[in-house]
Image (cartoon, rainbow, N blue to C red):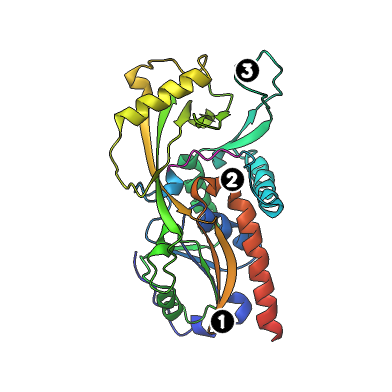
Amino acid sequence: MDDISHDSATMQLPFAQRPIVILGAGIIGCATAHQLLQHGFSVVLVAEFLPGDQDITYASAWAGAAWHPAGGITPNQRYIQAITHRVLLKMAQDPDSGVSIVDFREMSQGEYPDNFHSAWAYQTPVTDPTLHIPYLKKKIIGMGGIFIRHRARSLQELFDKFPESRIFINASGLGSKTLEDVQDDHCFAERGQNVFLRTDKFHTMYFRNGQEYTYIIPRPLSQGVVLGGVKQTDNLSPDVDPYIAQDEIARAHRLAPDIVPSQPAVEDISHIIGIRSSRRGGYRLDSEQRGDNTVLSAYGFGGGGYAFSYGIADALLKMVEKTERAKLID
C-alpha cells in the first residue's frame, strides 16, 4: 500500500494524539514503535521495506543478532546496550518473540586454545530475526500502529503528507545517504555474508576478535548456528561468494571443531546475505528542529543494530516525551 493521504478530521487531533511518524521499519524503527505504543503514543511507520520482506538491503531480516558487550564504546553506549539486554531477557520469556537465552559459563585455563590469553562465558540473549521482526510487526499492529509502504525521497515529503504530526523519527538507515534534505555522506553500505549450518549443537556462542574475526551464533529456534563474519564496504552483490563461505566454515571449525565440521554436508548449509547500514564516526542519535517539526535521527548502527535496538528505542522515547512536554507548555 502506498497511500499516505489523510482526511480533514485527522488534522484536528490534539497534539498529544498526533501520530509520531517513523521513517524506516528495520529493527530500530520497529523497536522504537513498539516502545512508543507501549507508552500510549500513536505511531505510523513509513518505509520502502517492511517486516517480511526479503530484500538484501533490508538488513534487519538477515542480521546475526547476538547481544554481546561491544568494546571501545562510551559509558552511555554501554548503558544503551544494557537496556537492550534487559528488554531481550524479558522478551525471551515469550517463545513467539524469537529471542532465546544461551547459557554461557566462565572458562578456565585449559578449556580454550593455547593462543588465547583468556576467555569468558555468560548468559546472553540471541535473537532470530526470521521470527523477531514478524513478531514485532504483529505486536505493533495489535497496539494500533500503522505500517505504510512508501519510499520517501525527503523528510519534507513526510512533513507535507502528515501535516498534523510534529515529531518525526528518521530511522531510515542507509536511506539517510540519499534523502534529499539529509544526504549524510558519513553513511555507507557494508555487505555481510554468513553461513547457516543446521545442527543440534546450538547452545554456545563464540567470538574471536583480531586477524581472524569469527563468530558462531546459536539459533536454537531455527535448529542451527550462524557462521561469520565478513564486512565488505560498498559491495551490494546479492550473489554468494563461495570463497567467503568456505573461509567462514574453515575459521569457525578452527574456533569450535566440536560444533563445526571441516566439511559440513551440503544439505546442512544455506547462505545469508545482507547489506548493513554503517556510518563513519559512529551512529547518529540526536534531535533537530525543522520549522515547526522536531526530527529525531537514529541510524548508522552497522552490525550493532540488534544489540543497541531497545536501548535506542528507550532513548528516543525520552526524547519524544521531552519534545512533547516542551510543545505542550510552550
Q: Which numbered disc flags the more N-terminal residue, 3 or 1? A: 1
Percent across and percent down for residue 268 are: 38, 21
Q: Which residue carries the number 3 mark?
A: 112
The stretch of residues the image draws in magenta is 62-67
Instruction: Name which residue type carries label 3.
Output: Tyr
Numbered circles on residues, count: 3
Please tell me whether residue 296 is drawn above or below residue 264 in the rendered image: below
Q: Which residue carries the number 1 mark?
A: 13
User: Main SS type for the magenta part?
Assistant: loop
Residue 55 vs residue 122, the one in the foreground:
122
Q: Does the residue at mark 3 contact the one at mark 1 (Cβ under 8 Å)? A: no
Checking the image for residue 307, the label placed there is: 2
Tell me the quarter of the image containing the N terminus: bottom left
User: Mark 3 or mark 1, which is nearer to you?
Assistant: 3
Report helix, strand or loop for mark 2. helix
User: Mark 3 or mark 2, which is nearer to you?
Assistant: 3
Q: Quadrant of residue 210?
A: top right
Checking the image for residue 290, the label placed there is: none
* Distance in Å between CA atoms under marks 1 and 2: 36 Å
